[in-house]
Amino acid sequence: MRWENLSDGPRRGAADAALFGADAVTTRTFDTPEFRGITFHEIRARTIVNRVPGASRMPFEWTVNPYRGCTHACVYCFARKTHSYLDLDTGLGFDSQIVVKVNAPELLRRQLASRRWHGEHIAMGTNVDCYQRAEGRYALMPGIIEALRDRANPFSILTKGTLILRDLDLLRQAAAVTDVGISVSVGFLDESLWRTVEPGTPAPGRRLEVVRTLTAHGIGCGVLMAPVIPFLGDEPEQLRATVRAVAEAGAVSVTPLVLHLRPGAREWFMSWLHQHHPHLVRRYERLYAEGAYAPTWYQRRITRQVHELAEEFGIGPTRAGAARRIRTAPEPEPEPGPTQLTLL
């Protein structure tokens, strides 16, 4: 397994530096029900603030990702491909081989204090969920939030995890001194679909409780309605039920995102589709024949429906990226057309 981008130890020969070495990582397993079958690779990273490539569609420039791999095990997760950079499997390996950057809080504090850092917005949860199950054991996020709070550095968090409520007090402290944006991902309410497509995540209803709790404590929370899964979660009554539930939870915004299937995720998702919904395989092959994204006409249809429902239920969709910096002031009116954030 290749590890050259994650170790902060001294560089040796080119071949040695590129390999997964025993001196660069501590590998652990825990014989508890919640971690059975999962291997954790504890690494001391060289850097924790990463610049998003210029060609990316992401509406932000800097990210912090304390973990690689994710026990949420979402079959559609675009980040699966990143595991191949370490010579790790993008299927079950992505779900069960978790890289933990154990020095993330101290490293972030050091990088934020650098003269070269100018306080730009930092997005978290954009690759894998920083509040996945591993966070319950390693507790990296409190130190990360404290570092951002102490420098009054704006940040945002996208999560499917209920564990974010553990850090509610820290989030309120940070929101008192800088811009803090929280978004929770809820693409649908169907629990039978959730159990197979997002098996390691809290149920959709529990995520909406997170929205309700954050809102009740004065932290505006948006919902990224993602992914909308073609032919399984895109019927008008399904969209209506989801947007209604999002509104009832007190979300300040709802932003739809149609399923996209990048290499790595595409193979794993299609394998899942063959197993659970074989009658849809040909329809997916046609819908995604041109690449990772559904056709523009389909994206626009879903976006229009969700925007209309949001207006009906009293929550406005946001312009691209706005949900990542939620404040109490009203949002500007959205531009027409689809919202394609490509976060998940």
Image (spheres, helix red, strand yellow):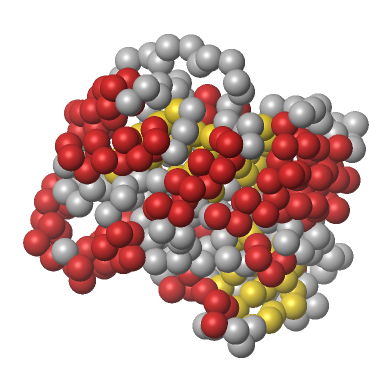
> Is 269 situated above or below 205?
below
- Identify the residue shown where x is 80% and y is 60%: 103
Q: Is residue 110 left or right of residue 70?
A: right
* Residue 258, image quadrant: top left
Nearer-the-camera pick, 24 or 35: 35
Nearer-the-camera pick, 74 or 274: 74
- Identify the residue shown where x is 74% and y is 44%: 169
Q: Quadrant of the N terminus?
A: bottom right
Nearer-the-camera pick, 180 or 343: 180
Q: Position of residue 187 (x, y in %)?
A: 35, 45
Q: Is residue 105 left or right of residue 99?
A: right
- Identify the residue shown where x is 48% and y is 69%: 95
Q: Position of residue 2 (x, y in %)?
A: 63, 69
Q: Position of residue 32 (x, y in %)?
A: 60, 84
> Is 83 situated above or below 296?
below
Q: Can residue 294 be seen by looking at this rendering? A: no
* Residue 131, image quadrant: bottom right
Q: Is residue 279 left or right of residue 258?
A: left
Q: Can residue 115 be seen by looking at this rendering? A: yes
Marker count (numbered):
0
Q: Position of residue 177 (x, y in %)?
A: 79, 28
- Identify the residue shown where x is 56% and y is 73%: 97
* Residue 263, image quadrant: bottom left
> Is 31 situated above or below 90?
below
